[in-house]
Amino acid sequence: MENQKDLEIRTGCDRGLCKAAIGRQDRQLNTYDWLSDVPGNADSTDLVEVQFKHTRKGYYHNVNRLPLKKGDIVAVEASPGHDIGVVTLTGRLVEIQLKKANLKNADDIKRIYRLARQIDMDKYREAKAREHETMIESREIAKGLGLKMKIGDVEYQGDGQKAIFYYIADERVDFRQLIKDLAAAFHVRIEMKQIGARQEAGRIGGTGPCGRELCCATWMKNFVSVSTGAARYQDISLNPQKLAGMCAKLKCCLNYEVDDYIEAGRKLPGHDIVLQTMDADYFMFKRDILAGLLTYSTDKRLAANLETITAERAKEVIDMNRRGEKPESLQPDDELKEAKTPTDLLADGDIHRFDKAKKKKKKKTQPRQGGDDAQQAKGRAETAKSVDNAQQPAQGQKPQGGQQPAQGQKPQQQQQGQQPAQKTRPNQKPPKKKKPQEPKGESKGEQNSNNGQKE
């Protein structure tokens, strides 16, 4: 087991190649063995399917009754020498695959020698390391001989005694001199094998426009010719860029459903039949073959007043026209066509529904007294304080103008009977000035006479 982990051909479920024969393998043309868990399946036949580089497969007899499973590396019989491959299928399904391979001669089925040993794998690695250099040099030799061919790949046998050259050519090529030059250059037995563009794409592998792995690299072995008629039956536009696959040929999948389209198309009326109504004549614009729906237009070339009906309704209108009758419309009488009105998707929506709600910052409000603002009260207090400072001279300072009050004379503020201004707090309203109260029992004239006597 430790030696097998170091081999270049890796096995195990970590690469998708499961020994239980039910997993996805890391090679092309994978076969799902749905009979792997059936008791006695592997003992039902001694035939084993072995796969080599890319899509090349072979079928062999397990004459030694080795306990082989999917993913085992084996040494098989070859001419000359032996080859190294991987077991991809065992049991009853091998017989079904053998019929698809069209092996006419039973002698083509050779035998399995043994499980690959370390010596066999060392020779295998040495042979595989020379494949790329051999391919580059062989292309230069073919170009020097003036041959119109492309050598796409080179595969060495497991023991290094034979090399298979895969080439592509549009015309017949005489490569007898090429084989002599290749044998003299590489000192191995030479085998030339011609392949097509589809087979080359399968050997390289890739992903198709459908998003899946290429059919020619996963399961397709026999390639059938594809024509543009398959696209016409399915009403596919004849666009070369869309109809061509990775191999620059028509896609093989065009033939998958063409039989169903041909059978369903027989139930539909022809393109040239015109449907006559009281309003206008209708021409076929397009059709959905599998769904059985037909779309008609009042203009032969443009899409005008389109009407979509079923194939049964179209046949009814055709029968009425043959009898000389014209229906009111293409739609059945019990199905009235509703006028399509444009709908506004944002009619009930708010344009601000995706805007983030902005959080308003709360301002710190200061308490109010007497209905006045705190700042206004503070301003009034400062003005009142400045007025008091202006009226009262500082201690030790002479009054303005250099005059001192006369002895026994009160300051001006006291003469007028005013009280000094009191200091107010910032948040407090300045006190109101009280008016001097009149003495009881004295009239205004008497009060004025008393003031005059004091002066």
Image (cartoon, rainbow, N blue to C red):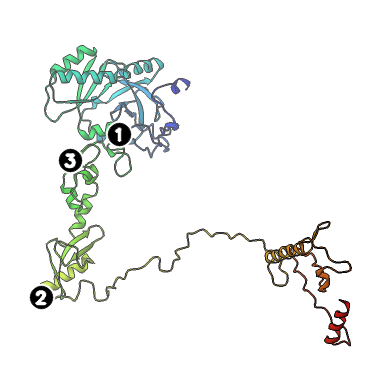
Quadrant of res 283: bottom left
Q: Which is nearer the N-term, disc 2 or disc 1?
A: 1
Q: Amino acid at mark 1?
A: Gly
Q: Are marks 2 and 1 in contact (CB under 8 Å)?
A: no
Percent x, y of residue 349: 44, 66
- Residue at (89, 88) in percent of width and height: 441
Along the viewing direction, whichever of 149 and 234 lies nearer the viewer: 149
Along the viewing direction, whichever of 216 and 89 lies nearer the viewer: 216
- Tag of residue 225: 3
Quadrant of res 311: bottom left
Q: Is residue 439 visible?
A: yes
- Residue at (31, 34) in percent of width and height: 29
Q: Which is nearer the N-term, disc 3 or disc 1?
A: 1
Badge 2 crowding class, 10 Å Cα cut-off, few under 14, some 14 to 19, many 20 or more, is few
Q: Nearer the viewer, mark 3 or mark 1?
A: 1
Describe the element under mark 2 as helix, strand or loop: loop
Describe the element under mark 3 as helix, strand or loop: loop
Q: Would you name the residue on which mark 1 appears? A: 205
Q: Are marks 3 and 2 in contact (CB under 8 Å)?
A: no
